Image: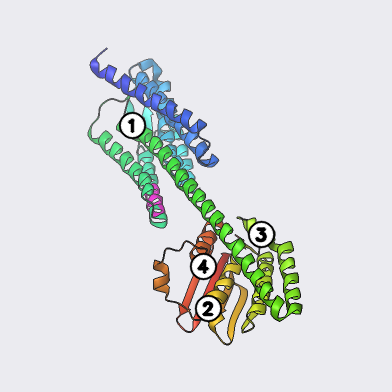
């Protein structure tokens, strides 16, 4: 056995061991999504089969009695290689249209059993390419272009450096094709085979890094919510008890009414304070309404108007009430006639909540630069985005007032 043959065997064994190791790791890794794990497993098995079948094909080339075996193995490789790229695409998108190209490619190459439009194996085991002999190469090129477009779109939409990995995978595969075209080594191995094995490894790394990022973000959100909950519960209760305490000296009857409202609030709404998931709007609205009734007793110069046209949707707990609380504490409390308008409507496929006040307002640019540690609008925005893909829009003008708009996707 020559040194070259030994090197090729060593390289093939290395690729197979890498695939087996990757398969074992993917099977054991329960952190990446089940769908992605299944796609990776399918691709690893497919790449492994292509390596094995390529060895059989190479062996059959040197034996004139194995013409039919060479035909079968050649057809299999031409059909399987584009599928590998489609499975890479499936890790980026649920797009199903690439499978149409796979169906066309499969039909074209299966015709090699009874026509010579793609290729034929002669009686003396020679290979003759037909007029459609490069169909698989063209389809692979289209699929690679498809893959890199999806990779660039993901990089642009998410703006995460980790999304350079799918782009790098495309570049590696393209370089493998170029190398095979420029430097023929041996039919038993190819640069493209090395490239797709590397691509599978890199895709696993990419998926795992995405999970780690999402997991870290979830832990950070949970900690933030825990801090938020610990701050807002005693804050609101303290203010309410202070209101009742003050009324006991000036208006005992009103103090009794306020205590009754506070009891209703605790009985019907205290459960929502511990929720970090989505709650019905009517529950959040009731929470807010009772809060404003208590606060307007303490501050009779404040008036709150409601125009609720849309209420059949979910949103994060403690979303509306803190916004109204901010409007009272930091906005309209200083006004002789402070007003807050709360409206809801269904508009452009969004459930829209509008909280407007005629308070003192603030400088938006200055506010965005602040690193707030207390429960504020920035935290509400983050929770809306992470829990329901919602939006929070702030409009404010000094000495004229503030408008906070919550937009929750309809049907989300």
Q: Quadrant of the N terminus?
A: top left
Q: Between disc 4 and disc 3, whose residue precedes?
A: 3
Q: Whole-Å distance between the Cαs marked 3 and 2? A: 26 Å
> Viewer-proximal residue, 239 or 103?
239
Q: Between disc 1 and disc 4, whose residue precedes?
A: 1
Q: Nearer the viewer, mark 2 or mark 4?
A: 2
Q: Predominant secondary structure in magenta?
A: helix
- Image mark for residue 331: 2
| Label 3 crowd bin: few (<14), some (14–19), many (20+), radius 10 Å | some
Q: Between disc 3 and disc 1, whose residue precedes?
A: 1
Q: Between disc 2 and disc 4, whose residue precedes?
A: 2
Query: Residue at (39%, 35%) from the top-left corner?
Result: 201
Query: Residue at (71%, 63%) from the top-left corner?
Result: 266
Q: Nearer the viewer, mark 3 or mark 2?
A: 2
Q: Whole-Å distance between the Cαs marked 2 and 4? A: 18 Å
Secondary structure under tag 4 reads strand
Residue 18: image quadrant is top left
> Viewer-proximal residue, 122 or 61?
61
Q: Which residue is mark 4?
A: 392
Residue 238 position, x and y percent, is 62, 66
Say if mark 2 contacts mark 4, CB within 8 Å: no
Q: Whole-Å distance between the Cαs marked 2 and 1? A: 64 Å
Residue 388 position, x and y percent, is 56, 59
Q: Between disc 3 and disc 2, whose residue precedes?
A: 3
- Judge whether 404 appears above or below 83 on screen: below
Say if mark 3 contacts mark 1, CB within 8 Å: no
- Image mark for residue 194: 1
In the rendered image, residue 24 lying in the magenta stretch gets the answer no
Q: Whole-Å distance between the Cαs marked 4 and 3? A: 21 Å
Q: Is residue 71 visible?
A: no
């Amino acid at each position: 056995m020559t040194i070259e043959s030994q090197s090729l065997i060593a390289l093939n064994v290395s690729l197979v061991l890498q695939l087996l190791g990757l398969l074992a790791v993917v099977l054991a890794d329960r952190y990446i999504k089940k769908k992605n794990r299944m796609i990776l497993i399918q691709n690893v098995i497919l790449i492994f089969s292509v390596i094995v079948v390529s060895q059989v094909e190479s062996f059959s080339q040197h034996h004139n009695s194995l013409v039919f075996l060479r035909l079968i193995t050649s057809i299999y490789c031409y059909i399987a290689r584009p599928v590998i790229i489609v499975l890479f695409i499936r890790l980026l998108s649920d797009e199903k249209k690439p499978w149409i190209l796979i169906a066309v490619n499969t039909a074209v190459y299966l015709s090699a059993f009874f026509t010579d439009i793609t290729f034929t194996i002669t009686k003396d085991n020679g290979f003759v390419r037909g007029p459609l002999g490069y169909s698989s190469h063209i389809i692979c090129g289209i699929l690679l272009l498809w893959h890199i477009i999806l990779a660039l779109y993901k990089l642009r939409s998410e703006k995460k450096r980790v999304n350079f990995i799918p782009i790098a995978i495309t570049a590696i595969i393209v370089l493998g094709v170029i190398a095979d075209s420029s430097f023929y080594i041996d039919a038993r191995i190819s640069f493209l085979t090395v490239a797709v094995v590397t691509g599978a490894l890199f895709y696993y790394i990419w998926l795992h890094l995405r999970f780690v990022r999402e997991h870290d973000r979830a832990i950070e959100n949970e900690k933030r919510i825990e801090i938020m909950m610990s701050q807002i519960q005693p804050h609101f209760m303290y203010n309410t008890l202070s209101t009742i305490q003050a009324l006991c000296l000036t208006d005992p009857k009103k103090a009794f009414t306020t205590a009754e409202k506070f009891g209703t609030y605790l009985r019907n709404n205290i459960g929502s304070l511990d929720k970090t998931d989505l709650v019905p709007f009517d529950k959040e609205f009731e929470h807010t309404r009772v809060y404003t009734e208590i606060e307007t007793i303490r501050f009779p110069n404040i008036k709150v108007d409601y125009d609720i046209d849309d209420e059949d949707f979910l949103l994060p707990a403690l979303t509306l009430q803190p916004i109204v609380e901010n409007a009272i504490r930091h906005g309209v409390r200083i006004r002789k006639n402070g007003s807050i308008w709360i409206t809801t409507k269904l508009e452009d496929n969004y459930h829209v909540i509008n909280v407007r006040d005629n308070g003192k307002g603030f400088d938006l640019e200055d506010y965005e630069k602040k690193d707030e540690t207390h429960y504020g609008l920035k935290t509400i925005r983050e929770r809306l985005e992470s829990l329901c893909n919602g939006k929070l829009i702030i409009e404010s003008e000094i000495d004229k007032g503030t408008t906070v708009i919550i937009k929750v996707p309809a049907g989300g």
